[in-house]
Amino acid sequence: MIATVLEAGARTGSLRGDVDPDDVLTLLLGLFLATPTGGAPHRVGPLLDLIVDALRPRPGD
């Protein structure tokens, strides 16, 4: 599933083409571990923003 989303985004230019789906899964698992239920809901948004920013193409790519 993650690979499909990454491939589609790479084709449209909205996501980087050099991202390994396993790396995205690791980032998401880290997010889930860092924000347990009821633990720090205010952190979820900023952490998801960081993940999304990491997937966006960099200038010059």
Image (cartoon, rainbow, N blue to C red):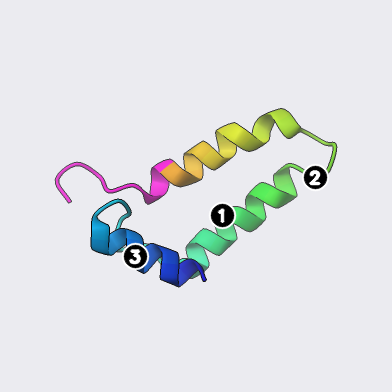
- For mark 3, what is the residue? 8
Q: Which residues are magenta?
A: 53-61
Q: Magenta segment: does it hold 42?
A: no
Label 2: which secondary element: loop
| Residue 5, image x, y percentages | 43, 64
Among numbered discs 1 and 3, the one appearing first in the sequence: 3
The residue tagged with tag 1: helix, strand or loop? helix
Q: Nearer the viewer, residue 59 or 8?
A: 8
Residue at mark 1: 27
Q: Which residue is mark 2?
A: 36
Circle 2 or circle 3, nearest the eye: 3
5 shown above or below 60? below
Between discs 1 and 2, the one toward the N terminus: 1
- Tell me if 51 is positioned left or right of 10 in this view: right
Q: Secondary structure at mark 3?
A: helix
> In x, y percent, where is residue 46?
57, 32
* Left or right, residue 6 beside residue 17: right
